Amino acid sequence: MIYLNGKFMPIEEACIPVLDRGFIFGDGVYEVIPAYSRKPFRLGKHLKRLQHSLDGIRLKNPFSNDEWKNLLEQVIAKNDGEDQYLYLHITRGVAKRDHAFPVNVPPTVFIMSNPLLPPPAELLVSGASAITALDNRWIRCDVKAISLLPNVLLRQLAVDMQALETILIRDGFLTEGAASNIFVVKNGVLLAPPKSNLMLPGITYDVVLELAAANRIPHEVRDISEAEVRTADEILLTSSTKEIMPITSLDNQPVGKGKPGELFARLHALYQDYKATNMRGGHSCGCSHS
Ligand code: PDD
């Protein structure tokens, strides 16, 4: 069951007009929110990022945070599975094709849910492979825009090479993955690229840095050169749907010892604990957040 413009319906019955600006221009933004045990994870942070994306494209938020929460809870309740991921999508609505914003047109609002499956156990044991590519996206990668053509093409490069993800390099520095954030470990220190307009501020990225801080794992947020990515002891990938995963091969070369490293094991265990505590309504990392 999905939500579309005020109504719940089976996804097969959902239709949008061909003049929707999402279809015509990719003119919209989205969010992906995991729900564990039917409770949205870090909802407040996802809604804050949604507001940032809407502000970035100058589109008014159609709902208050309470209204979003209520709608998302209804979608969760109408779908099977304890763990789901919610996809929500807002476009600038339906109007005669013209690049300029239409006046007085209501936005299109769509929410769907899909089963949230943990990453395959064998990939957590053996690690996954990644390739690198030049980051050729626009310079507002902090906006979670539905116009994802560069990300789609970059991610397909990985699929073509039987790899999980494409790690992006811009002007000699790591930005992120085609659909994930990337961390590097060198000499026991967790390195994270600083948030900027060149990457999506990942919600899972924040969790990992908070867990590192709360558990005294040495970490630094700073620019990471391509050479540091290539000589990393460990590379970690994070996203709401993949949680935290080890990258053990990069461009067909082993990363460090070629198997998941110590910091991955620690952070993965901490992340699982944190999720469980969060679902019971508390926080395990000692910070105050929703
Ligand atoms: N993608 N960077 C990009 C470009 C992403 O598309 C994503 C997530 C992330 C990780 O952000 P978070 O931890 O908040 O999921 C970073 C989602 C899952 C998607 O598009 O399906």
Image (tube, helix red, strand yellow):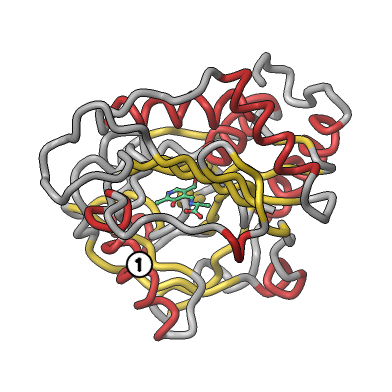
Residue 281 x/y as whole percent:
84, 24
Instruction: Report the front residue among 206 and 154.
Output: 154
Vertical placement of 246 versus 35: above or below?
below
User: Which residue is located at x 53 percent, y 55 percent?
Assistant: 237
Q: Nearer the viewer, residue 184 or 206?
A: 206
Residue 244 shows in this picture:
no
Q: At 67% from the left edge and 14% from the top edge, which residue is drawn?
A: 288
- What element does badge 1 sit on? helix
**71 on left or right of 235:** right
**Quarter of the image that includes the C terminus:** top right
Q: Position of residue 279 (x, y in %)?
A: 83, 33
Q: Quadrant of residue 99?
A: top left
Q: Which residue is mark 1?
A: 152
Q: x%, y% of residue 28?
A: 33, 43
Q: Residue furthest top?
A: 288
- Mark 1 burial class by Cα count in 10 Å: few <14, some 14-19, many 20+: few
| Residue sticking out furthest to the right | 280
For residue 126, which quarter of the picture? Answer: bottom right
Q: Quadrant of residue 283?
A: top right
Q: Is residue 28 left or right of residue 213?
A: left
Name the residue at 35% across, 67% down: 152
| Residue 148 visible, this orientation | yes
Indicate the position of residue 92 as horizontal and vertical percent values: 30, 39
